[in-house]
Amino acid sequence: MTNAAERHYFYRLFFIFIIWVHFITNPVSCEERWDGVVVTQSNFLALQAFKQELIDPKGFLKTWNDSGFGACSGAWLGIKCAQGQVIVIQLPWKGLKGQITDRIGQLQGLRKLSLHNNHITGSIPSSLGLLVNLRGLQLFNNRLTGSIPSSLGSCPLLQSLDFSNNLLTGTIPESFGNSTKLYWLNLSFNSLSGSIPTSLTSLNSLTFMSLQHNNLSGSIPSLKNGLISLQNLVLDHNFLTGTIPGSLGDLRELREISLSNNHFSGHIPQSIGKISNLKQLDLSLNNLSGEIPVSFDNLLILSFFNVSHNNLSGPVPTLLAQKFNSSSFVGNVQLCGYSPSTQCSSPAPSEGEGAPSEVSKHRHHKKLGTKDIILIVAGVLLVVLITVCCILLFCLFRKRKTSNDEEGHVTARSGAASARAGKGVPPIGGEVEAGGDAGGKLVHFDGPLAFTADDLLCATAEIMGKSTYGTVYKATLEDGSQAAVKRLREKITKNQREFESEVSVLGRIRHENLLAMRAYYLGPKGEKLLVFDYMPKGSLASFLHAHGPETRIDWATRMNIAQGMARGMLYLHSHENIIHGNLTSSNVLLDENTNAKIADFGLSRLMTTAANSNVIATAGALGYRAPELSKLKKANTKTDVYSLGVILLELLTRKPPGEAMNGVDLPQWVASIVKEEWTNEVFDVDLMRDSSTNGDELLNTLKLALHCVDPSPSARPEVQMILQQLEEIRPQMISSGISSDEGAIPTSE
Ligand SMILES: *[C@@H]1O[C@H](CO)[C@@H](O)[C@H](O)[C@H]1NC(C)=O
Ligand SMILES: *[C@@H]1O[C@H](CO)[C@@H](O)[C@H](O)[C@H]1NC(C)=O
Ligand SMILES: *[C@@H]1O[C@H](CO)[C@@H](O)[C@H](O)[C@H]1NC(C)=O
Ligand SMILES: *[C@@H]1O[C@H](CO)[C@@H](O)[C@H](O)[C@H]1NC(C)=O
Ligand SMILES: *[C@@H]1O[C@H](CO)[C@@H](O)[C@H](O)[C@H]1NC(C)=O
Ligand SMILES: *[C@@H]1O[C@H](CO)[C@@H](O)[C@H](O)[C@H]1NC(C)=O
């Protein structure tokens, strides 16, 4: 036992060493080692001037001390160079005061200036407009004054600009319309005035625009032929007037529209109901009149809606009224139908007898008699009774046919989700081509992460693991958000065209038990990076084996993981028609609520055939490979089921299948013990503590797992059957599964 442990430890160390060597030779970030070129004289002088005009109470710039030799070697804090040119200045959260020197315009190679969260005063130097390589400008959370230099419009590569939360005045320069690569614009929380420049509406790369909390006036320019990539339009807390343009409805990528606290008037355009991706719509505190368009009932994923404090009238569309409470509608004197006290009455208010009516598209000008009222009330009562009966029947039916129903349920919903994700990313409009180093290409899929290619390449990266396909890093972006980045081995990936067509399919797969891919990046030299959600709890393998037995993992948690895995695999097999081929406990990740998220699925589609047989071999070495794969070269649903069975055994025994027990693998070991008698020895001692309550569940799960690892593929069940049985073994998981599920709908992507 100790021998095995030692061996294990040795392998671990060896593995870490390999990773370290890989990191030294293959860095993912742009923090390349010094290329040996000393900083140029003009850059050195500019840096000196830069330091001189700043006040550095905490002494961070003390490292900028020698005659410039160290400036590019990594010795100067916050400086990165290439060929003697400063390309990045990154000094956020350093307590810096003073001003930004005008001589910054001398740093001809500068791509990124990041000085956010300091106390810098003075104005933004107009010489920044001389920097033809500038891509990112992060000056938010400072005390900058003066106006935004219009010269910035002549930085042809500008991608991301954040001046938010300063004291800037003046107008937004019309010249921004020239920044055709601009992807991110945050000018919120300043004192900018004037109107929104018409030229901004031609920016077809822009995905995020926030101008909230300023003093902007005038109206929103027409949005025809522009802003096709825009996802967030945030203009609240200004003095904007005029009507909301109907052309807003053409911006189909929009997720968020916030126009509250302005002076918009006129009707709400019904075209907004066409933006099927819309999640947040805030029109509160304006002077809008007319009705809420019925088309808004088509906004199926809307999770925030507010039209309170306007001058709206008429009935609230039915679905909106059901989904949102009265705080979304109050302050519109003539609006009705959103709460019991605001029922829409037929227009005879003087009579004082408001009878409830159906959504009143048609308005009868007819007084209601007592008879009518009685009839209506009776009708309503009947409808209510029928509804209640239906619900009761439905519940009964559901309880009986638990598992089948549940599967249909999951599949249908995920289907909708993936259709949505698909819609969110049209092949051209959704792509954000970031003009990276030399034509690198970054493509985002639906999701909360927003970053440019440079942000990604400059993220601090930490190696998490390595597989046949490549290395996984934990990347921390500058805004603090985290992502898992997989750098694929270039030599074993398919050519770019095939790669892109396959990856765009994988990037749209969304299921709560499958790890979502958020973006991919193709570097100019053939580098391929995949960006996924980062899972802070790590893999199931480390969850089970990295801690000693003193950390308890209860049966409910393990069963929840098992059922989650089965749901994810079922979705892959039956909905996406994808074979995983490399399912191991290291490829099952856990979210913050310890729900299973299967990773690495479908990656084989991105790889050459040779690479894939290699992976099959590795999985075999780790004990997850179905025996028939030694002859067969291709994985199939039954080999996936075998791997799933091994993980179920792993959950029950808490033993890593990679380590042989008495010379046999985990399935054989378990089978040999079970054969003698139904012994409890196979189970993790932890599970035995409350075996009185769980005993049957453990045994039945064990039987199921052994069924999955049957040497004969045809004897193994399909995933659908596995899920059904798991849900029968521990049915209460179903209901908790549903409720946690439903809670997740508004926030799910
Ligand atoms: C410059 O600063 C670094 C770090 O504070 C220090 O290690 C180094 O000795 C200094 N060099 C000179 C020439 O003062
Ligand atoms: C834009 O800037 C404001 C103020 O700094 C900030 O609160 C907001 O989160 C920023 N928007 C995004 C999406 O980063
Ligand atoms: C609100 O809009 C109406 C026209 O719809 C206009 O007559 C009125 O002056 C506006 N009120 C304010 C406070 O802007
Ligand atoms: C509200 O809208 C009506 C027209 O629907 C208009 O006559 C009235 O002036 C508006 N009230 C305010 C306070 O703007
Ligand atoms: C209405 O909904 C919002 C958000 O959904 C919630 O914060 C608020 O408490 C609710 N208000 C009432 C009166 O139910
Ligand atoms: C809607 O906006 C009003 C005014 O800003 C606010 O008081 C209310 O809480 C908001 N309701 C919701 C659901 O956000």
Image (cartoon, rainbow, N blue to C red):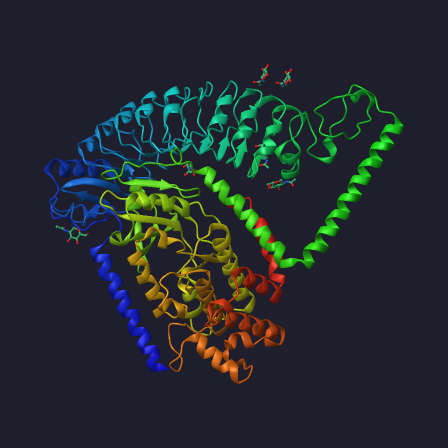
Q: Quarter for ligand 3?
A: top right
Residue 239 appears in the figure: no
**Position above or below: 484 against 274:** below
**Position above or below: 16 against 117:** below
**Position above or below: 658 against 100:** below
Q: 98 or 167: nearer the eye?
A: 167
Horizontal arrangement in the rendering, residue 528 relative to residue 549 (left or right)? left
Residue at screen point 37% across, 75% down: 659
Instruction: Point out residue 467 in the picture as x, y percentages from the top left corner.
Output: 32, 60
Instruction: Point out residue 326 in the picture as x, y percentages from the top left corner.
Output: 66, 35
Extreme residue in the right direction: 371
Rendering quarter of residue 328: top right
Q: 610 or 318: nearer the eye?
A: 610
Q: 103 or 160: nearer the eye?
A: 160
Rendering quarter of residue 313: top right
Instruction: Point out residue 491 in the picture as x, y percentages from the top left corner.
Output: 24, 53
Q: Count the marks.
A: 0
Instruction: Point out residue 262 in the picture as x, y percentages from the top left corner.
Output: 52, 24
Rendering quarter of residue 466: bottom left
**Position above or below: 524 against 221:** below
Horizontal arrangement in the rendering, residue 345 relative to residue 571 (left or right)? right
Q: Quadrant of the N terminus?
A: bottom left
Residue 125 appears in the figure: yes
